[in-house]
Amino acid sequence: MHVFESIKLGVAVPTAAQLGLEPPRFCAECGRRMIVQVRPDGWRAQCSRHGQVDSVDLEAQR
C-alpha cells in the first residue's frame, strides 16, 4: 500500500479493496494522483509520469 493510501486506525477496509477490485488512486512509484476510468470489464488508471495500469494486465499476472 502506498504511503498516501495508509489506512486510518479503526476504519474498515472495503471488501472490494481487499480483493484488488478497486482501482489505484495514486501512483505506486511517485505518489501522484492518477486519472482513473472505470469500465464494465474493469478499470484503467494513468499516471502523468509513469503511464497506464490496466486491470486486464494485472489479472493476467495473477
Image: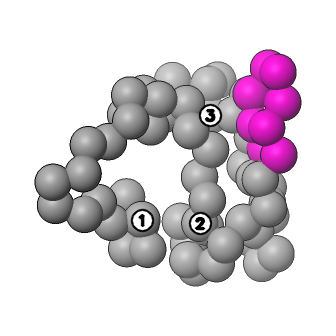
Crowd class of label 1 (few under 14; some 14 to 19; many from 20; radius 10 Å) = few
Q: Nearer the viewer, mark 1 or mark 3?
A: 1
Q: Is residue 48 above or below residue 8?
A: below
Numbered disc 1: secondary structure: helix
Which residues are the magenta region? 37-44
Determine whether label 2 and label 1 are within 8 Å by CB: yes
Compared to residue 10, the image places residue 54 above or below, namely above
* Left or right of 22, for residue 19: left
Q: Please name whichever residue, 41 or 8, is drawn nearer the observer in this view of the structure.
A: 8
**Residue at horizontal 43 percent and vertical 74 percent from the top:** 4
Tell me which residue sits at (62%, 25%) in the image.
59
Name the quadrant of the N terminus: bottom left
Q: Is residue 46 visible?
A: yes
Q: Which mark is residue 62?
A: none
Q: Marks 1 and 3, Cα distance to the nearest angstrom?
A: 19 Å
The x, y position of residue 31, in whole percent, is 55, 77
Q: Amino acid at mark 3?
A: Leu
Please give the residue where the numbered disc 1 appears in the rendered image. 5
Which residue sits at x=77%, y=78%? 49
| Label 3 packing within 10 angstroms: few (<14), some (14-19), many (20+) | few
Considering the whole magenta stretch, tell me its main secondary structure: strand
Amino acid type of disc 1? Glu
Work out whether residue 1 or residue 9 is closer to the camera in this orientation and state it. 9
Q: Earlier in the sequence, mark 2 or mark 1?
A: 1
Instruction: Give the SS element for disc 2.
Output: loop
Disc 3 marks which residue? 58
Q: What is the number of the mark on residue 26? A: 2
